[in-house]
Image (cartoon, rainbow, N blue to C red):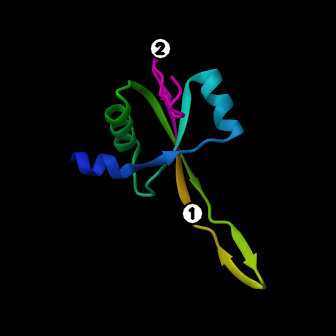
Amino acid sequence: MSAERLLEIIYAPHVSEKTARATEKGNVYTFKVATRAAKPEIKQAIEKLFNTKVEAVRIVNVKAKKRRFRGVEGLKKKWKKAYVTLAEGQKIDLHGDQ
């Protein structure tokens, strides 16, 4: 797989209270990824970008939500979320802390 494709797969880390707890308990990190990305592609991209060893990848398709603004209905975009479990002793620094 090309290096360009791997860089296009991962959009950003998804940080919330739930993902913070998962990171502390089970060494699981969450990322917003391309909607057409597959598990092996996500695994390769994480391993290449962060120089880590990935044990497992779980994917969740987040559905579009209905929103209303001044009486006009619309939809938020649907997106894909990946839960990445790292090998024991591996770590990703998402906040830039040293």
Towards the viewer: 26 or 69: 69
Q: Which mark is residue 89?
A: 2
Look at the image and tell me in which quarter the N terminus lies: top left
From the top left corner, tell me how far across and down residue 55 is, in percent: 44, 25
From the top left corner, tell me how far across and down residue 54 is, in percent: 41, 27
Q: Which amino acid, mark 1?
A: Lys
From the top left corner, tell me how far across and down residue 81 is, in percent: 54, 48
Magenta region: which residues? 82-98
Q: Residue furthest right?
A: 71
In the picture of the structure, the residue carrying the numbered disc 1 is: 78
* Residue depicted at x 31% and y 46%: 6
SS class of the residue under badge 2? loop
* Residue depicted at x 51% and y 22%: 98
* Residue depicted at x 47% and y 25%: 86
SS class of the residue under badge 1? loop
Is 63 above or below relative to 13? Answer: below
**Mark 2 Cα within 10 Å, few/some/many (few <14, many 20+)?**
few
Q: Residue furthest bottom?
A: 71
